[in-house]
Image (cartoon, rainbow, N blue to C red):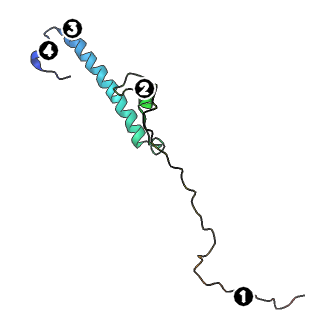
């Protein structure tokens, strides 16, 4: 919505109503900005990597400019999440390429 001085009303009541409407819109945009900032840069931002339109609409608790997905979303391509491979841990084992020597040490006395 672009405001030009020649389009503004001279009526103070209409101007006050317009200012309140713009302030409400500004507050809604600030709330959406704060929520998105938290999702992207927050403590658990790694877990919220995929943000769907439904989540945005539910998280705001108000109308959003993002349209929710259709009820029949068979045609919608969903991101494929790969299973995370289990990490291989080498606890105390030497690499296979190192030479192996077996040495038996006998005790001095076997009493």
Which of the two residues, 70 or 102, is positioned nearer the viewer here? 70
Q: Which residue in the protein does label 2 denote? A: 70
Which residue is denoted by mark 4 in the rendering?
Answer: 8
* Circle 3 or circle 2, nearest the eye: 2
Whichever of labels 1 and 2 marks the residue nearer the N terminus, that label is 2
| Marks 3/1: CA–CA distance | 98 Å
**Crowd tier of the residue under label 3, counting other residues whose Cα lies within 10 Å: few below 14, some 14–19, many 20 or above:** few
**Residue closest to the eye, 24 or 103:** 103
Q: CA distance from mark 3 to mark 2?
A: 41 Å
Query: Separation of disc 1 and disc 2 at Cα?
Result: 72 Å
The residue mark sitting in front, 2 or 4, is 2
Question: Viewer-nearest of labels 4 and 1?
Answer: 1
Instruction: Quickly name the residue at label 1.
Output: 103
> Which numbered disc flags the more N-terminal residue, 4 or 1?
4
In this rendering, the label closer to the viewer, 4 or 3 = 4
First in sequence, mark 3 or 2: give its number. Answer: 3
Distance from Cα at disc 2 to Cα at disc 4: 39 Å
| Image location of residue 14, percent across then percent down | 20, 9
Tell me which residue sits at (40%, 43%) in the image: 41
Q: CA distance from mark 4 to mark 1?
A: 96 Å
* Residue at the farthest left position: 6
Q: Quadrant of residue 103?
A: bottom right
- Mark 3 or 1, nearer chain start: 3
Relative vertical location of residue 90 with respect to residue 97 in this rendering, above or below: above
Please state if 22 lies on the left or on the right of 46 as rendered.
left
Q: Residue at x 41, y 31 (%)?
A: 53
Q: Which residue lies under the disc numbered 3?
A: 13
């Amino acid at each position: 919505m672009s405001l030009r001085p020649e389009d503004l009303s001279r009526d103070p009541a209409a101007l006050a109503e317009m200012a309140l409407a713009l302030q409400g819109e500004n507050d809604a945009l600030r709330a959406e900005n704060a929520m998105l900032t938290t999702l992207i840069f927050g403590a658990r931002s790694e877990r919220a990597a995929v943000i769907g339109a439904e989540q945005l609409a539910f998280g705001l608790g108000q109308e959003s400019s993002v349209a929710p997905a259709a009820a029949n979303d068979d045609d919608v391509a969903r991101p494929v999440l790969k299973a995370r491979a289990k990490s291989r841990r080498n606890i105390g084992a030497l690499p296979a390429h190192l030479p192996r020597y077996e040495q038996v040490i006998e005790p001095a006395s076997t009493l």
